[in-house]
Image (cartoon, coloured by chain):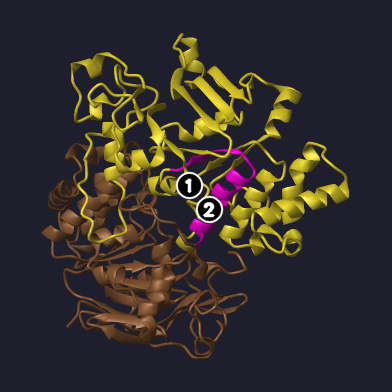
Chain colours: A brown, B yellow
Amino acid sequence: MSLLEIKNLKIHYRTKNGVAEAVDDVTFSVESGNTLGLVGESGCGKTTIAKAIMRLLPPNGRIAEGKILFKGRNLVDLSMNEVRKYRWEEIAMISQSAMNALNPVARVGNQLIEAMQAHRQVSREEAGRRMAEVFELVGLSIERAKDYPHQFSGGMKQRAVIAMALMLEPELIIADEPTTALDVLVQAQIILKIKELLSKLSTAMILITHDIAVVAETCERMLVMYAGKVMEHAKTDDIFYNPYNPYTLGLQNAFPSVKGERRELISISGFPPQLINPPPGCRFSKRCPFVLPICREQEPILEEVGPEHFSACHRSADVEEIRVKSKEEKTWEKEKVA
Amino acid sequence: MPNTVIHVENLKKYFAISKGPFSKLFGLSDEIVKAVDNVSFSVDSGKILGFAGESGCGKTTTGMLCVRLYRPTEGNILFEGRDISTYEGSELLRFRSAAQMIFQDPYESLNPRFTVFRTVCEPLEIHGIGNRTEREEKVHTALKRAELRPPEQFFAMYPHQLSGGQRQRVSIARAIVMEPKFLVADEPVSMLDVSIRAGVLKLFKRLTVSMEMAGVFISHDLSFLRHICDQTAIMYLGRIIEIGDTETIITTPTHPYARALLAGVSVPDPRVKGERIVLKGEVPSAKNIPPGCRFHPRCYLAQDRCRRDDPVLEKKASGAEVACYMVD
């Protein structure tokens, strides 16, 4: 049994213009101790999935269909009282701009202790001991526990938030853009820390980011999303070296690197479709240079194209040709500009 | 023959932080933040110089000084041979028509109540250029150059009707409508999605070359600089510590800080296993710059001399100019 299994998940947001299908028929699973990178651009639904797992969707958001099975239990059906038991205890979340999630008027150490006492019947001393442990795990000196958040640098605040997520020894950590707001060197430090922690602890992690470089470095598996859909799902190495989906190829073309040969960057023209009454067919079809008439009519299903490798594209059979052509800039040129 | 548009010499910008009336009463002086501390460089027309470094290193302040959004504390800024560092009033206004800046956040730098036409036309009005038809023509050309096609379609649109990429292109159109000679872009693509960043980066490069502007591109992300900058300067605590040909600095950085910075960049390739260089401590405050080489407290090569003397930029083996005693 997988630690986390998401089956045919659909999440809808009510808006004044209609219902937005933010996540549409998403299925994936995470095994104990594994790391999964959830990648995509703004609005692709990656954060919405994280919020649904934590049952933290805003009031206008609703899980319309599907299951979120955590150790076999469907989190979708739980009452808020039951939710409180697994949230933070078993699944912790490091949210976007977590650096601002700390209470500015409470000492950092106390915030960790209080978080633990809110969940477990433990003495202050015991919680204090655990706090010292996690402080050491993330590389913060215990003397700094008495400081207030404003006395911490950005990287230290981020480590404090990671420490807080580790307080209750969760089995799954969802990290939403944990390094995006940080400087290069601090980001590198946090990534090293996360990698070290994952190898030491048996915690599984879902890393949500737009930065495929961070995923390349930290995750075993990778899920590429576009406009609420899973486009491709495989081992990270396969996504980079054996990609099938035109969107994945486009994303790689557009991503700059400081290593290897300098190559021309190629952008994907156009922009994602609206999620309220999305057009029929593949959601990437409007921007895809390899589009066929069928792509505009029929939605491609996520099919197995290799061992543990899934891609949603009508043209998976032509992948060799698509890979070659996708490296040429003129393939992606279109009149309309994003 | 290279045509130097902007030449900066020993530029300094110090900010005084007032400690309040009580400290003044007791004769305590204000604290001084040395945001930019003796920086020199020049940019030729059609070329782009990139500035990289961590937050607080002074790269944005340098950019803002160059277009005179700040007045320098010391030093000269020569624009087409004339020193504009102390310009005021109408002289400054005239200089600004030739030097423009693009900011990071296209969601905040555009007035939400202005149509695209009004936004792009505003500089022409401020500088009193052309009549109604001429202005319309110039706005049309600027939007076309920024690849917002067909331009007429965008005239009446408001920022909220545009995507992030289109908004940044409107900012670019506004910056080039005066046909400036000098263009500074501060993190222009950081807020944009991956798939559209490349297009905006290339547009900046193309315009710099075709309109023969000198460009300055500021970013914390060295991989962006690699794709559009001819030269790159890496800053640390208000100083340039390495400057030279971009590809040289990206592939073979010399300064110990530049090496650590490059080693810290994640690479979009799971098979590349880079060695990270972990630096001691954190960037010190610009209020309190260490004596000697300002990088020495965190440096893994530091010797006695580095604690005592302040190194200046010198040409090293790679061809780049580097401020360090310990490397060749």
Q: Amino acid at mark 1?
A: Ile
Magenta-tinted stretch: B196-219
- Location of residue B304 in the rendering, given as x and y in whole percent from the top left corner: 19, 16
Q: Chain of mark 1?
A: B
Q: Main secondary structure of the magenta part?
A: helix
Whether A261 is among the magenta residues is no
For residue B312, what is the image quadrant? Answer: top left
Q: Amino acid at mark 2?
A: Lys
Q: Chain of mark 2?
A: B
Disc 2 marks which residue?
B202
Disc 1 marks which residue?
B228
- The reply to whether residue B262 is visible in this rendering is yes
Q: Is disc 2 in the same subunit as disc 1? A: yes
Q: Nearer the viewer, residue A84 or B200?
A: B200
- Location of residue B281 in the rendering, given as x and y in whole percent from the top left corner: 24, 34
Q: Is residue A72 above or below residue A161?
A: below
Q: Earlier in the sequence, mark 2 or mark 1?
A: 2
Lateral position of residue A323 relative to residue B91, left or right: left
- Location of residue A118 in the rendering, given as x and y in whole percent from the top left corner: 25, 60
Task: Residue at 30%, 79% (x, y): give it.
Answer: A28
Q: Secondary structure at mark 1?
A: helix
Whether B211 is among the magenta residues is yes
Name of the residue lying farthest toward the front: B1
